[in-house]
């Protein structure tokens, strides 16, 4: 471990926050103490063996102040992928912006509150749930977020309510975010037999260097379904670490899709616990990186209850001197008989200097299971390229078509038409020397 809370003690003391409740103040102090003890992870840590966070640790980011202005709504909606008609909650440089947000499309019964408002309006609920899933023991970045998170969103979906439209949470950074750290927090509870979808977009309007460290924790009740789509298209000078911890009840479904094409260095952690019999988790992801970018995805699925299923499909397209990482682990408890787990990671390297490290893992302590994992790394099919060029397709278009075809399988797991169509367009354009990111 390197660096840590000592360099941020002054920023922590300046938080104030108008006198948070005692339990929250204690939680933050404990988180800062843990962060100070742990420091930033180094490559000696097995979970971070292929990803050095030295570029984050060697800087000291300052807390962001509320922005003095907001980007035009039309410009904001053009910068994100999705449907403008979706209900949305917008955060600018880490602070909620009500003028850009629009939550009227959500049905009655769905409760959406900012973190600040929820702490005042539903303190007992917050005390019972905030930080209970996303614990910070031995998790430096989660501890860092817990100590410094000032704003975020709390979402509660009542029993049996199936919400037709997704909630779009937009995190935008502008020039005022330069040198700042942003610690957004998301707390989601989907009650029994309900269904809900969330799209989280992380975008920037310029090449500002800043650090996003997001943490989300979600409870999916018995028979409930939660879909979470994360689109990370931040500044190419920025740094991004995102962690999501999910607990699932009986016969529930959690579906996650992660798209990453921004940031100089990015890491996405998805941790799911299948606590109820018959639960299912689907984890999918796509990263498209080039230049000197580094993108890392880590998953950890814990099969605690019997007859649960997990499906993972992650794909990467790596060009230039970029470095992709996938580290996926499936743990099967002795009580989790009849587990069905499949994990796949495939990477396409588009240049001789592009590289990838892939480490799928299985840790099984039950004897009646079906678990498989696989990883492949390859380059564009020269025979297919030759065939396409011989039929009059230019070299650049042939390359783009084959690249898109590689990505299409995982993009098809996106069930929201507007999001899928937008990401398909980006995937097709990314490596045709346009400015699409």
Image (cartoon, helix red, strand yellow):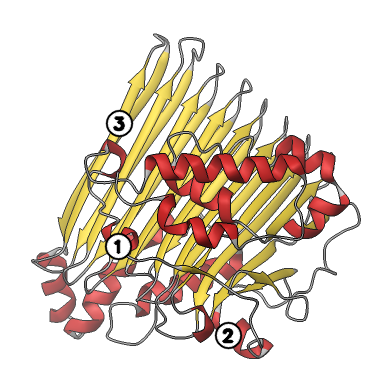
Front-lying residue, 312 or 303: 303
Q: Name the residue under label 1.
A: 58
Q: Mark 3 points at which residue?
A: 361
Residue at 19% from the left image edge and 76% from the top image edge: 388
The earlier-in-sequence mark between 1 and 2 is: 1
Is residue 331 depicted above or below 299 in this figure? above
Question: What kind of element bears circle 3?
Answer: strand
Q: Do the residues labelled 3 and 2 touch (CB within 8 Å)?
A: no
Residue 295 appears at what percent x and percent y? 32, 59
Residue 111 appears at what percent x and percent y? 84, 54
Residue at 61% from the left image edge and 61% from the top image edge: 199
Q: Nearer the viewer, mark 1 or mark 3?
A: 1
Residue at 60% from the left image edge and 63% from the top image edge: 14
Residue 17 appears at what percent x and percent y? 71, 60
Question: What kind of element bears circle 1?
Answer: loop
- How far separated are the C-alphas under marks 1 and 3? 31 Å
Relative placement, left or right, of 415 versus 400 is right
- How far separated are the C-alphas under marks 3 and 2? 40 Å
Q: Give the quarter of the image for residue 350.
A: bottom left
The earlier-in-sequence mark between 3 and 2 is: 2
Q: Give the quarter of the image for residue 410.
A: bottom left
Mark linked to residue 78: 2
Residue 165 seen from this side: yes
Front-lying residue, 415 or 119: 119
Front-lying residue, 181 or 219: 181
Residue at 29% from the left image edge and 68% from the top image edge: 289
Number of marks in the image?
A: 3
Is residue 140 depicted above or below 7 in this figure? above
Question: What kind of element bears circle 2?
Answer: helix
């Amino acid at each position: 471990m390197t660096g840590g809370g000592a360099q941020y003690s002054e920023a922590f003391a300046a938080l104030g926050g108008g006198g948070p409740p005692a339990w929250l103040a204690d939680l933050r102090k404990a988180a800062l103490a843990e962060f100070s003890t742990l420091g930033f992870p180094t490559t000696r840590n097995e979970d971070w063996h292929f990803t050095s966070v030295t570029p984050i640790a060697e800087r000291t980011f300052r807390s962001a102040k509320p922005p003095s202005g907001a980007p035009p709504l039309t410009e904001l909606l053009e910068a994100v992928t999705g449907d403008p008609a979706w209900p949305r909650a917008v955060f600018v440089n880490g602070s909620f912006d009500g003028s850009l947000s629009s939550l009227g499309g959500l049905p009655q019964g769905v409760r959406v509150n900012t973190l600040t408002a929820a702490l005042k309006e539903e303190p007992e609920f917050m005390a019972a749930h905030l930080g209970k899933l996303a614990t910070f023991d031995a998790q430096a970045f989660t501890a860092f977020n817990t100590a410094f998170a000032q704003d975020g969103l709390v979402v509660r979906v009542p029993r049996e309510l199936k919400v037709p439209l997704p909630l779009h949470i937009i995190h935008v950074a502008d020039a005022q975010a330069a040198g700042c750290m942003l610690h957004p927090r998301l707390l989601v509870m989907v009650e029994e037999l309900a269904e809900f979808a969330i799209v989280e977009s992380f975008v920037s309007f310029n090449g500002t260097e800043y650090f996003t460290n997001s943490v989300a924790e979600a409870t999916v009740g018995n028979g409930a379904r939660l879909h979470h789509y994360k689109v990370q298209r931040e500044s190419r000078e920025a740094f991004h670490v995102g962690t999501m911890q999910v607990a699932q009840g009986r016969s529930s479904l959690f579906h996650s899709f992660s798209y990453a094409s921004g940031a100089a260095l990015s890491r996405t952690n998805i941790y799911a616990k299948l606590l109820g019999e018959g639960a299912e988790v689907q984890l999918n992801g796509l990263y498209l990186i080039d230049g000197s970018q580094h993108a890392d995805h880590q998953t950890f699925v814990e099969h605690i209850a019997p007859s649960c299923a997990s499906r993972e499909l992650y794909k990467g397209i790596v060009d230039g001197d970029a470095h992709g990482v996938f580290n996926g682990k499936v743990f099967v408890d002795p009580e989790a008989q009849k587990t069905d787990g499949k994990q796949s990671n495939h990477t396409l390297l588009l240049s001789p200097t592009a590289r990838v490290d892939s480490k799928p893992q299985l840790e099984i302590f039950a004897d009646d299971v079906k678990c498989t994992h696989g990883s492949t790394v390859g380059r564009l099919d020269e025979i297919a390229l030759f065939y396409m060029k011989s039929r009059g397709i230019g070299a650049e278009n042939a390359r783009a078509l084959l690249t898109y075809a590689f990505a299409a399988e995982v993009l098809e797991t996106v069930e929201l038409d507007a999001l899928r169509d937008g990401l398909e367009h980006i995937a097709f354009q990314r490596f045709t020397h346009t400015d699409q990111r």
